[in-house]
Image (spheres, rainbow, N blue to C red):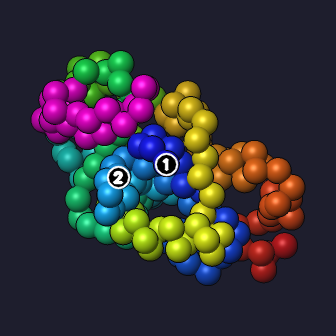
Amino acid sequence: MNCGNLLIATPKIIGDHDFHRSVIIITSLDDENISGHIINKKLNYNLNNLIEDIKPPIPLFYGGPVETDRLFFIHKSSIKIPESKKISNHINWCGDLDMTIKLINDKTISSNDIMFFLGYSGWDRSQLESEFIDKSWRLFRNDISNYLFQKNIVNIWKDCIKSFGNDYILWFNTPNNPNHN
């Protein structure tokens, strides 16, 4: 497991509101902890609803249940933002927020280059290892940088689940709530 990999919630997490059908990009890991942000749960308001200085509407995502009052972001590594941390060859994490706002307002950064999150998802290593053994999560190691910043990433969970083969074939076209089937 590396930063930039994706954690894919399996259908086993069906009753968990936070993680049901979640796709999480890993942004930080060490010997004890792993954290990341849910990339496929768009909120019903934009970043400019939180930060008045931002002119264009930038989507905002629910990053996870921890510190939901904190703002985080990932961006293409081709965009140079001071103090950002490389998490893969094509993706950086956070950095100088004031500079980021300036680059957004100057149109150097668009919504195709960056994703903002409220909150994050985190585990201690033994907890996540236990959830892997329980088959609640699968690891997706392919480079997703081209897919990540698309405006509509609603299907990313289905696409990742399909890539695991026939183990989850029943779930490909099942509605978000199976009771609506």
Please state which of residues 19 and 176 is positioned toward the viewer in this rendering. 19
Q: Which residue is mark 2?
A: 29
Location of residue 4 (image quadrant): top left
Q: What SS does tag 2 mark?
A: strand
Q: Which residue is mark 1?
A: 1
Q: Count residues near mark 2 (Cα–Cα under 10 Å), then give few for <14, some for 14-19, many for 20+.
A: some
Q: Position of residue 20 (x, y in %)?
A: 59, 69
Q: Position of residue 164 (x, y in %)?
A: 76, 50
Q: Position of residue 109 (x, y in %)?
A: 32, 24
Does 75 sit left or right of 133 as displayed?
left
Marks 2 and 1, Cα distance to the nearest angstrom?
9 Å
Tally of numbered tags: 2
Q: Split into 4 quadrants, where in the image is the C terminus?
A: bottom right
Which of pointers 2 and 1 lies earlier in the amino acid sequence?
1
Seen from this angle, which residue lies furthest front?
A: 31
Please state which of residues 30 and 122 is positioned toward the viewer in this rendering. 30
At a point 45% along the width and 44% down the height, the residue shown is 2
Please state which of residues 114 and 141 is positioned toward the viewer in this rendering. 141
Which residue type carries mark 1? Met
Does 55 sit left or right of 16 as displayed?
left
Please state which of residues 179 and 167 is positioned toward the viewer in this rendering. 167
Cβ atoms under marks 2 and 1 closer than 8 Å: yes
Location of residue 116 (image quadrant): top left
Q: What SS does tag 1 mark?
A: loop
Q: Position of residue 40 (x, y in %)?
A: 54, 52
Q: Can residue 86 be seen at all in this image of the molecule?
A: yes
- Residue 178 belongs to the span the image colors magenta: no
Which residue type carries mark 2? Leu
Q: Give the magenta-colored segment's residue range.
A: 81-101
